[in-house]
Amino acid sequence: MKSKVYFIKVNDTDTQDEIKDKLSLLLAKSRIFDILRKDERVAIKMHFGEEGNMGFVRPEYVRIACDKIIEKGAHPFLSDTNTLYRGRRTNSADHLKLAYEHGFTQDICGAEVNIPDDSKKENIAEVKANRAFIKTAKVAKLFLDADALIGVAHFKGHMMTGFGGALKNIGMGCATREGKLSQHSDISPIVHAANCTACGACVEACPADCFAIVNNKAVIDNAKCTGCATCIAVCNFNAIDVNWGAGGDTMQEKMAEYAYAVLKSKRKAAFINFATKITKECDCLAKDDPRIAPDVGILASFDPVALDKASYGLAVIAAGKDIFKESHPLRDGMKQLKHAVELGLGTLEYELIEVD
């Protein structure tokens, strides 16, 4: 059975007000918020953008979704999780400040922003996935506690997954740092000795006691490492990092299995993709990437697999070539979608319903 994917065109020349009007019309026609009931807590999974990056979905557009949710009598809040890499989004305090700087405030969006601190156990949920690669997923608990989950994603390219859309926004985006590490790499973090100052922050912070200072450099005992990624967060000298190339062949499948862990218990979930300002890389890069394709539009569906497949297809048509394969020839983004189908997250068959 084909899934319904609703779509409204957006042009590069559209003003913010025109895009807001189009999003409002798309939400009305798709009726994806009809699943919501009075007094329900609704988590809107966002990406607030890294410092210097402007590819993220604008807060003014998020306001349209929040207002529609509030009209249903429900209570929206915006959220994301902290990152593995060093930057403004590594810890909750700096991440929240950056979100405010990018305009994601109560006044502009009509909803609070909640970025959980995954260094506190009470903010982490362990979900039994029992899939091929992920047996237990570590995710931010607030996404599971919410009555409904709305994924709002910027559809774009990605160096490790070919592209990132609805599935990546949930699978990678709802994971704790430990969960992100398990998806990115098959091994423990690594130490860049040249950057290490032997400050001992990693030794003090490591809950598994796997760090030591040897010859004025930090060393890690891989046998003890649990992959919590606390060391990456506390190191102020970029001396501890992920081996980003390790585990690349299975990252997409792991990401889909994390999405499965988040969504398997969610009776109410819907997804929106902004296929606008389509860039070569994700919004985690601390720079403003140029477009690699014309703006396509905004899409909405209850099926994240069909939504990503439709977004991909429309972007390729708009560009006149497979921009994702051209940008990242070693990555086949269809892997994540095919594995997601095997997990029961959706279907590759869809009916595209254009809203005019």
Image: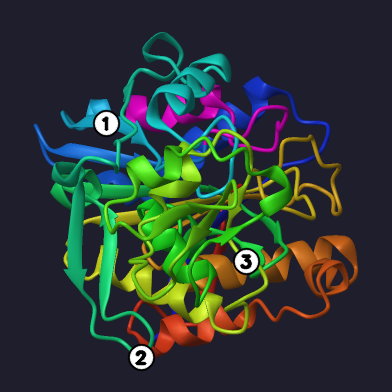
Above or below for 323 versus 325: above
The alpha-carbon separation of the residues under discs 1 and 3 comes to: 36 Å
The residue depicted at 50 percent of the width and 74 percent of the height is 187
The magenta region covers 48-69
Element assignment for label 3: loop
In the image, 293: left or right of 22? right
Disc nearer the start of the sequence (2/1): 1
Q: Amino acid at mark 2?
A: Ala
Count residues near mark 2 (Cα–Cα under 10 Å), then give few for <14, some for 14-19, many for 20+. Answer: few
Q: Nearer the viewer, residue 158 or 206?
A: 206
The residue depicted at 69 percent of the width and 38 percent of the height is 55
Residue extending farthest left: 39
Percent coordinates x, y for residue 172 in the rendering:
45, 59
The residue depicted at 40 percent of the width and 23 percent of the height is 93
The alpha-carbon separation of the residues under discs 2 and 3 comes to: 22 Å
Residue 349 visible in rendering: no
Q: Which residue is mark 3?
A: 243
Which quarter of the figure has residue 308? Answer: bottom right
Disc nearer the start of the sequence (2/3): 2
Percent coordinates x, y for residue 89 in the rendering:
51, 34
Percent coordinates x, y for residue 166 in the rendering:
49, 59
Q: Which mark is residue 132?
A: 2
Above or below for 211 versus 86: below
Q: Is residue 49 magenta?
A: yes
Percent coordinates x, y for residue 90 in the rendering:
49, 37
In the image, 202: left or right of 332? left
The residue depicted at 26 percent of the width and 81 percent of the height is 135
Q: Amino acid at mark 3?
A: Asn
Element assignment for label 1: strand
CB of mark 1 within 8 Å of CB of mark 3? Answer: no
Numbered disc in front, either 1 or 3: 3
Q: Which residue is mark 1?
A: 76
